[in-house]
Image (spheres, grey):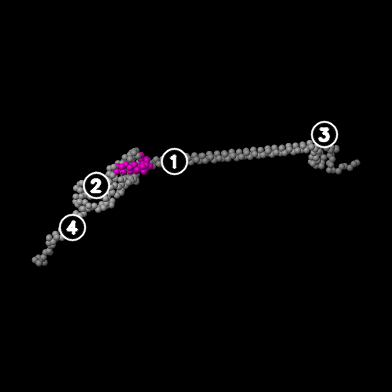
């Protein structure tokens, strides 16, 4: 066993020496804390205001950068002034025909310089403002009012116009109340009730069926009109052929009549010529007979009792081409 008598307790540092080390550290820490309370930094996306014991000292908002303030008694309030966005989902509205519609609304806004102090110290609690919550309430109210004037069937057709009307109404209200600038407002989604969707699908189907039936009627009418046109064309072709044939016959008859007329005129002209020649020379007839005589005497001659044989010598006629009989 260790001899208790010979055991020595460890030496503890002396309190004065310890205090001599701690005091400078405390002094340095306190000095740094005091110094840190003498300035503040505003980020590039922020602006700030300063209150001293509850009194707003700021006449103009502090821009981004390094600024001094009184330690402990001055309070710095900051607000974001860069462009920001937020979205409201599943906002339920009702139309003029009492249909429930769920929409989503997206908003893009910015806080201008002149609205900083108003938002920090005149809206809500000083230095503690939920801007999105304030704007959301206005958007919900203005959207409900505008959709209550719209017919559900025309919402999709007038979607752009509705979004424009909501943007104008919200922008005016937010500017008047808070001085905030609304850059854009969108309605990215519109969801109709199941009952309305079913009724629209039924209406679309009925419309499609009506269009199909109308197309069938139009097709039948077109086919009938084609047949009528074809029949009319065939009839006109037959008429044209008949007219052509008639015209051809008329032209042929006219040609034949003209030919007869020409031949008659030629014969008459020939008769006149022969008559004139006969008047000038009576022996023309003898010349004509001589030209036409074949060398044989005529078989008959005209007498008092009609035509009689030219040579009638008994029962046999004498053929000039045969030799005469010998005399007895």
Q: Residues within 10 Å of mark 4 (few under 14, many from 20)?
A: few
* Residue 211: mark in rendering: 1
What stretch of residues is rendered in magenta?
151-175
The front one of 125 and 145 is 125
Nearest to viewer (mark 4 / mark 3):
4
Please name which of the two marks, 2 or 1, marks the residue nearer to the observer. Answer: 2
In the picture, the quarter occupied by the N terminus is bottom left
The magenta stretch spans residue 114: no
Q: Is residue 106 visible?
A: no
SS for tag 1?
helix
Find the distance from the CA under tag 4 to the CA under tag 1. 89 Å
Residue denoted by label 3: 303
Comes first in the chain, label 2 or label 3: 2
Is disc 2 placed on a helix, strand or loop?
A: loop
Q: Which mark is residue 59?
A: 2
113 left or right of 301 in image: left
């Amino acid at each position: 066993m260790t001899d208790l008598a010979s055991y020595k307790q460890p030496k503890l540092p002396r309190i004065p020496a310890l205090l001599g080390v701690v005091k400078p550290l405390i002094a340095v820490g306190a000095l740094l804390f005091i110094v840190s309370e003498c300035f503040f930094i505003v980020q590039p996306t922020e602006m700030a205001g300063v209150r001293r014991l509850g009194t707003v000292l700021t006449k103009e908002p502090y821009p981004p950068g390094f600024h001094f303030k009184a330690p402990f008694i001055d309070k710095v309030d900051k607000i974001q002034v860069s462009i920001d966005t937020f979205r409201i989902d599943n906002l339920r509205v009702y139309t003029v025909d009492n249909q429930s519609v769920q929409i989503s609304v997206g908003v893009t806004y910015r806080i201008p310089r002149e609205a900083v102090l108003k938002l920090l110290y005149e809206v809500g609690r000083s230095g503690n403002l939920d801007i999105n919550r304030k704007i959301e309430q206005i958007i919900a109210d203005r959207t409900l009012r505008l959709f209550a004037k719209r017919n559900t069937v025309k919402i999709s057709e007038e979607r752009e116009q509705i979004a424009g009307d909501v943007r104008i109404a919200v922008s005016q209200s937010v500017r008047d109340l808070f001085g905030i600038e609304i850059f854009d407002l969108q309605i990215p989604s519109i969801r109709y009730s199941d009952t309305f969707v079913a009724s629209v699908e039924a209406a679309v189907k009925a419309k499609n069926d009506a269009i199909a039936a109308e197309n069938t009627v139009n097709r039948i009418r077109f086919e009938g009109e084609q047949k009528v046109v074809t029949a009319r064309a065939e009839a006109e072709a037959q008429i044209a052929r008949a007219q052509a044939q008639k015209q051809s016959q008329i032209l042929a008859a006219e040609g034949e009549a003209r030919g007869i007329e020409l031949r008659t005129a030629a014969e008459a002209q020939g008769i006149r010529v022969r008559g004139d020649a006969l008047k000038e020379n009576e022996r023309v007839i003898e010349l004509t007979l001589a030209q036409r005589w074949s060398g044989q005497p005529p078989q008959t001659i005209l007498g008092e009792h009609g035509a009689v044989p030219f040579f009638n010598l008994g029962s046999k006629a004498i053929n000039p081409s045969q030799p005469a009989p010998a005399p007895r």
